[in-house]
Amino acid sequence: MMQRIYLVIALFSLTMLFACQQEPQQKSKTTTDNTTPTVVVVNYPLEFIVESLVGPDVKVLNPVPADADPETWFPDDAMLLKIQQADLIITNGADFADWVKKLSLPRSKVLRTSLSLKDALITVPDFDVHTHGAGGAHSHAGTVAFFWLDPDLMTRQADAIAKKLILLLPQEKAKITANLKKLQGSLLLLSQKLDQLRTNYPGLHWFSQRPVYQYLARRINGTVHHLHWEKNTAPNESTWSKLNTMQEQQKIALMFWEQRPEEKVVKELQQRGVASFVLDPLTVKPAQGDYLTEMQRQLNQLEAFLKQHTSSSKPAEK
Amino acid sequence: MNGILRLTFRYLAYNKLKTITLILCVSLALLLPVLLQFGVVQFEQDLLARARSTPLIAGAKGSRFDLALQSMYFSRAELEPTTMQEVESIQETGYALPIPLALRFTAQGAPLVGTTLDYFEFRKLEIEKGTSLRRLGDCVIGASLAEKIQLKPGDRLMSDPLNVFDLSGNYPLKMRVVGVLGKSGSPDDDAVFVDLKTEWVISGIGHGHQSINAATDKDLVLKQEDQRTIANAAVPQFNEVTEDNLASFHFHGQSETFPISSIILVPADEKSEVLLLGMYDAENSVLQLIRPTEIVNELLELVFRVKQLFDMNTLLVSVSVGLLLALIFLLSLRLRKRERQTMFQLGSSRSTIWKLQLTEIAFILGTSLIIVFGIAVVFRIYAYQIMRFLFIE
């Protein structure tokens, strides 16, 4: 009898012992001790701003390969991990860079520079023409993303980035502030060049393939008519016919291209009285020089180009 | 003394039914108040721990309790949605880190939480297996849920449709399980986490579909305009995000207008917290800002009031059980009068006979206490799961 009682007590104790498992503990988060902070940027103009502000004090990571389009490029898993672990991710906003919209990023580390330009953003009503269902085509308004083509807006972007960098590197405040002033001074030169173009060539009209040059146009008091031409796709019969109709009404003599178009397209445009000019928006790092030198060079070229075509760059008065 | 014990056990073993009945009666009478006390303490600890780790919650004006409980415990509630614009506004103030939560959907019955990577850092959740969220269509699941539905990184998990009879409603999304969280002993163990953007794809704000070749997909083309091909409604939408179709996914509208259920706010400091509370304490404010600890304390006050009623009831039941037991023992003594006389005649002293009786009572009470203690220990250990099972699930 006693043995049975001892057996019951022993079994009960064992049950208790197994039941007494440890409460799950939250593992303490291991922090990585990284001395040089990493700042990720989504395009070259932002890379240029960060490098101008902090130099080697931060590791600037522009993950987009030189031969890729920063608007449509996607990182692989290894690169995404690097991006997610960065100390600061500076995005352009206005839906520039597809990967920002489709990948998971730590929101607290993301600086959307377009937020500092809210009052200056240009929204195009027919930014994207798109159809679902039987309702026919409809257009979506969209914000033009190429802010840096207006040096004043780029200055404001730089200002917002500088504030965030100071929070990241408080010990570098004086240096960042000094560099910001220097950058503002350099951008002022570009701004003055644009002022000159505005004075010399007021009311300039030009075509573009897609909404890119709106900020530049506003800065020099010009007007852009985007044609909804697909990037890297040759215009077809219908496209040319539509352009013919537009030209009959407007007589616009200029078209800006982001990259050099095919000779055949240039000739077709010339036949319709449209001269082509390549103005690279510098979303990727130029082969030579930097943002400032390359933009200055392009604006000088534009000035020379306009000198040749001034008479025909305004639309015909009706 | 050994003789007394032996005789007592022999007697109790011979009268099994009576012994077991008495032990059960005493155990049950003691168990109710003990378990209630543990339950209330656990309930209080759970609620307060989660509330203390959640500084502020913002959401559309409505039930404060629903807002707090859904944002902290992912319990089902029909919260009025707010928009990402509110998240932007809070972020712009610089007073707090806003962590948006979208809590409208479920996956295999488990709450599906649309949020950002900041949530995992805020709750100190570690990925035990696999990786964190990477892209649209990825999900990370809580440890208990992974165990329950037997999923691991690399598997697929379908979201549940809001209404199975609404054919025009949102389509379920086949999500890629990329990670399993470590156990945290919190409601996060039973949830599915996705990026906010994935939640918007599930709700139909974003979608992906095949690109149309006007020459080969004539059945899908509505019309051809310049370089654009306009597709008709027959174009099938992707129900899974893959590396190949990721680029085709897009959202309609401005992200600032997209819906979320609530926002967890992590204030920069105490001053910022007060400023935020002041900012939203206005009649015309579209948001309400709540301190979860205050809401939980209000809930606990209610619980304590109910507990007082239970305590009163327990007291009365205990008194009646005590009287009943006393009666049973007295009647038992009367029934065993001849037995005592026999023992006396055999030479047992009166004190030995009384010791025998008292040992029996002590054994019954002692066994009952051990049982109550054992059950209480088990309850204490599994209190979290039991409380969740009873009150949350």
Image: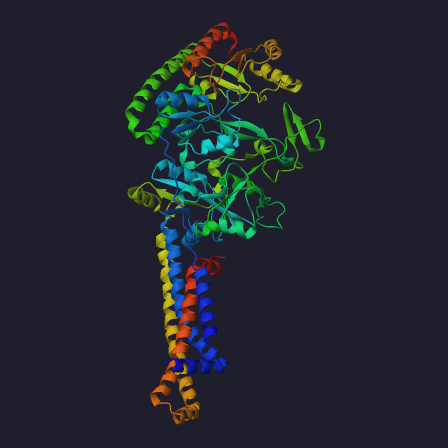
Is any part of residue A201 visible from this angle? no
Q: Quadrant of the C terminus of chain A?
A: top right
* Total marks placed: 0
B208 or B31, which is in the foreground? Answer: B31
A188 or A260, which is in the foreground? Answer: A260
Which quadrant would residue A166 be assigned to in this image? top left
Q: Is residue B254 above or below residue A188?
A: below
Which quadrant would residue A300 be assigned to in this image? top left
Q: Residue at x 30, y 23 (%)?
A: A175
Q: Is residue B292 left or right of residue A306?
A: left
Q: Is residue A89 above or below residue B182?
A: above
A238 or A169, which is in the foreground? Answer: A169
Q: Residue at x 37, y 32 (%)?
A: A34
Q: Is residue B298 left or right of residue A313?
A: left
Give the x, y percent position of residue A303. Answer: 45, 9
Give the x, y percent position of residue B56. Answer: 37, 47
Give the x, y percent position of residue B341. Answer: 40, 93
Q: Residue at x 38, y 21 (%)?
A: A51
Q: Is residue A82 above or below residue B63?
A: above
